[in-house]
Amino acid sequence: MDAVVQQYLDRFGVSDATRRFLTKPQKMFIGGQWLDSGDDEVVDVIEPSTGGLVTHLPVGSLGDLDLAVAAARRQFDGGEWRRLKPLERERLLHRLADLIEANAIELAEIESIDMGKSVSQARDIDIQGTIDTIRYFAGWASKLHGRTVEPSLPGNYLAYTRKEPIGVVAAIVPWNFPLQTMAWKLAAALAVGCTVVVKPAELTSLSTLRFAELVQEAGIPDGVVNIVTGRGSVIGAAMTRHPGIDKLTFTGSTPVGRTVGQTAVDSVKRVTLELGGKSPVLVLEDADIPAAARAVANGVFFNSGQVCDAGTRAYVHRSVYEQFLQELVAYTSTLKIAPGLDPDCFISPLVSAKQKDNVSSYIAAGVQEGAELVYGGRPQDGPGYFVEPTIFAHCRNDMRIVQEEIFGPVLVTAPFDTIEEAVTLANDSPFGLAAAIYSNDLGLVHSLIPQLHAGTVYVNAHSTIDPAMPFGGFKESGFGKDLGPEQLDYLMETKAVWITLP
């Protein structure tokens, strides 16, 4: 660990538990064993607020993936996990959630140090969301069932269906919400009796490895959960075609997701894709403008804009457009830019130098295309990967900053004159992950909701996530659902049974 990172941890009083975890050798978790890479290759883990070295991660090989899939396959085909009584699986998942809760501060600190995000937001949203998700799906373990049918064809039959776990599930997890998104994919799979192989993002794998220690401590059998760190281009790509994997669930960018989906379909794998977004926000003329401005800013600048369903396109009725911009700029100026471990931080660094450069290039492109820069737009000097929250006004829908996912703290805005125009602007995108409406006219809101091409519609709010509600998009934002009872259907097979009776 670099001295600059040690000083950073000292400055904010990071817990001894977090320090112990960060200073020990990091290994993959396969079949209940902690293993180095089969190729002995490692990669640096860089802390985004300082740019300093934290530790090293093993870079998994194809042989390591084979070991992990074999462990998951043995456990699923002949182990005890899927054969446990449902209430026993439920009890173990609740035990795991309890352990995460008991170690919440440590996990939030690890998440902040690894990804750069606000430690307060990590604690209240990422870690609490992980706990809630595991507890929610733990309850489903004992509530899965098929149905009986009275056939109409001649004869005397007993006909019924069974719901059976799909098998070995491969989960490819993004870098922006490492632990929480992993829980979205893992909790439901474990509840129904599947086993899993997780590939965390190469940029942010640390919280997943700490999670694996808690899996072991909870008494979940070896081989049920396996963690293979490494490059998406190697491990992730191999998962899509591995014959031992039955289901693939991926969260990430649309270009990568398109490739993942094509390869998975070629090998006839079940697949769920949660991909990119460019979510529109409609601010109607009757909205509470100060409240809407605050909510829109929070919705786009949370996690420094590194959120797939962030409301990055705001279309505002022309009669309130200038007032909205004034309120938006005034509120955004109060958001504190600070290192992730600062408890008062709201705008944290981006995850990497590459991401900072990418976001900065989009801001420059917006200026070149003629958008009016009304706030921010400057990368911060000094260490770390900070970019100011940025607001553009009077944007056109043909601009790159309007059409392409930036994944940073950048909001584009434009006025509209009619509801029909607002809907057209909102739907003029290849993405369809989420949308938001700010209005107090519930009749109008309800008429708008079916017109918006989005998997989720927020009203007078943004990114309100709950494990009981499904999450997933339309169009190039993917297909399939994470969360909610809807997710269970993507993790089970339905078997039809016919019995001829005397």
Image (tube, rainbow, N blue to C red):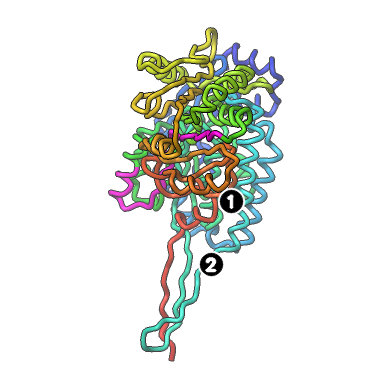
Question: SS at mark 1?
Answer: loop
Relative image position of residue 396 (x, y in whole percent): 38, 25
Magenta residue check for 265:
yes
Task: Name the image quarter holding residue 401.
Answer: top left
> Residue visible at 59% across and 31% down?
292
Task: Name the image quarter holding residue 495.
Answer: bottom left
> Residue visible at 38% across and 52% down?
270
What distance separates the C-alpha of mark 1 from that of mark 2?
Answer: 18 Å
Q: From where the camera sits, is residue 276 visible?
A: no
Residue 145 disc label: 2
What is the residue that sits farthest to the top in this orientation?
A: 381
> Residue visible at 50% across and 30% down?
316
What residue did someone put label 1 on?
A: 468
Relative image position of residue 129 (x, y in whole percent): 62, 41
Question: SS at mark 2?
Answer: loop
What is the residue that sits farthest to the bottom in this orientation?
A: 502
Q: Which amino acid lies under the numbered mark 1 shown in the image of this protein? A: Ala
The residue closer to the viewer here, 27 or 416, is 416
Q: Residues within 10 Å of mark 2 (few under 14, many from 20)?
A: few
The residue closer to the viewer here, 328 or 358, is 328
The residue closer to the viewer here, 379 or 320, is 320
Q: Residues within 10 Å of mark 1 (few under 14, many from 20)?
A: some
Q: Which residues are magenta?
A: 261-285
Magenta residue check for 469:
no
Q: Earlier in the sequence, mark 1 or mark 2?
A: 2
Left or right of 236? Residue 52 is: right
